[in-house]
Image (tube, coloured by chain):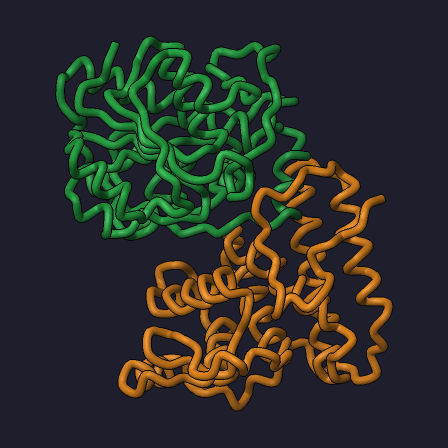
Amino acid sequence: MGEYIYSKGDLIKNPNTYFYADFKGIDFLHAWLQSREQVLSSIDVQEKLSHDDFFEITDAKNFRTLTHKYNETNLIYTKDLLLSILSELEKSSFDMSDNELAYWLDLLVKKFEVTKKIHESYGDSFKAVDKSKNRDFYLYILLSGVFCSAYIKTRHLKFLNVLLKVNDSLCSFSEELTEFQIAHTVKILKLEKNFVLQLSKELGVAI
Amino acid sequence: MILNKIVLLAGFTARSQAYVQAMQNYGFAPEYTILFGPERPILPGQVEMHSTSDLRSDLFYPDLSIPLKQSIKQKQWQFESIDCINVNNEMIRSVLLKLSPDLVIYSGYGSQLVKPFLLDTKIPFLHMHSGWLPEYKGSTTLYYSWIAEQNCAVSAIYLLPGIDEGPILLRKKYPLPPSGIDPDYIYDCSIRADLLIDIIGKIKKDKKNIDAKPQNDTGSIYYVIHPVLKHLARLSKKY
């Protein structure tokens, strides 16, 4: 079995492009699965999550208030934004006709797909306020949680695609995560695995 | 048959080889061809040559072992090479303005967007997008459509600055790639070339450019497909 290379190295400094990835048959999917399993088995989950929710989002700011304020101030903190979107996704029966939420989800998809990074805060035209502040691993976990939730609600491939890429990054720095972050990462990776296995079943691919 | 006032602007890619070979197969030649970029493969969309001459299909498959320039020289097409990596180049712009064609058939590199710098010349740039528009905008949409719809598609559009937002001339659906055909370099290029030939045929028949319909706002922009999803598509039982 070959090696899964897309979660290796410092992916913040040297991100993958994923251009023209070679086809390596079923072995590739086995290698991906094994790579994710290795991350799961190598991290010791000391701190159990106390509830089934992804995150403690009870203190999340109101999504609409927050985003409307951004339109006035041109400044938004990513943690606030991601928690508010998670909260919104939890409580609403989200579909693509919710234009405002769909707009922000698409903006986050684009931001990560293009830069492969997530920054502490964003300013005018949703550009990073400080480009050096891109190593807060909790933000990558929250972002992954947002895409998990969006995929559960919509089954839209664009969310699964970006989720796989965020999780490549998460796995690449799994050894640097705190206990609290590890607990969330475990949940996210298990969800991702279920998504891929479900899709493979629908497509008649036995992994 | 020379296509008057039609210019081919092409990078050294498998797609350009497909376009040129398909046009030659159907007896068409652009009035002028502008080649740009590096001949050896260093940019997205470029590939080491390999032969596909033993393939049998209703579609015209290019033989990628034949270099682009060789095909062009063999049929004595009028052409020039411009030494630049990016299409948004002053030399390219100035040649286009001098030629002032009615249409540019565009076949560039995967990661480059044609900017207003060229589009502001008001010369229409014809682009064959490998996806059903407006639903499937962006990159590697062949694979997304493969997974979600179990088919492929090509849309012919005039380029606008936004990604795959231009008005649509023609769209066509295609079956999934036959087993054993490389989807990236052979099938994708072949179906784009196939619709290009349809467009050229229509332009020749009507003796004018084809009217295009603006897109509505529906659809999503897709980004380079993750290798896991790409493998799921290619290993799909329905493939």
Image label count: 0
Is B77 above or below relative to B9?
above
A139 with respect to B135 (left or right):
right
| Residue A142 locus on image (x, y percent) | 58, 76
Q: Colour of chain B?
A: green
| Residue A161 locus on image (x, y percent) | 56, 54
| Residue B76 locus on image (x, y percent) | 34, 13
**Quarter holding the N terminus of chain A?**
top right
Residue A94 appearing in the image: no
Residue A128 appearing in the image: yes
**Quarter holding the C terminus of chain A?**
top right
| Residue B133 locus on image (x, y percent) | 34, 40
**In front of the other: B236 or B55:** B55
A195 with respect to A133 (left or right):
right
Is B130 above or below relative to B228?
above
Residue at 21% x, 42% y is: B94
Quadrant of the image occupied by residue B135: top left
**In front of the other: B31 or B218:** B31
Chain in orange, by letter, is: A
Quadrant of the image occupied by residue B22: top left
B79 with respect to A196 (left or right):
left
Residue at 48% x, 52% y is: B223
**In front of the other: A33 or A176:** A176
Residue at 18% x, 19% y is: B4
Quadrant of the image occupied by residue A73: bottom left
Residue at 16% x, 26% y is: B209
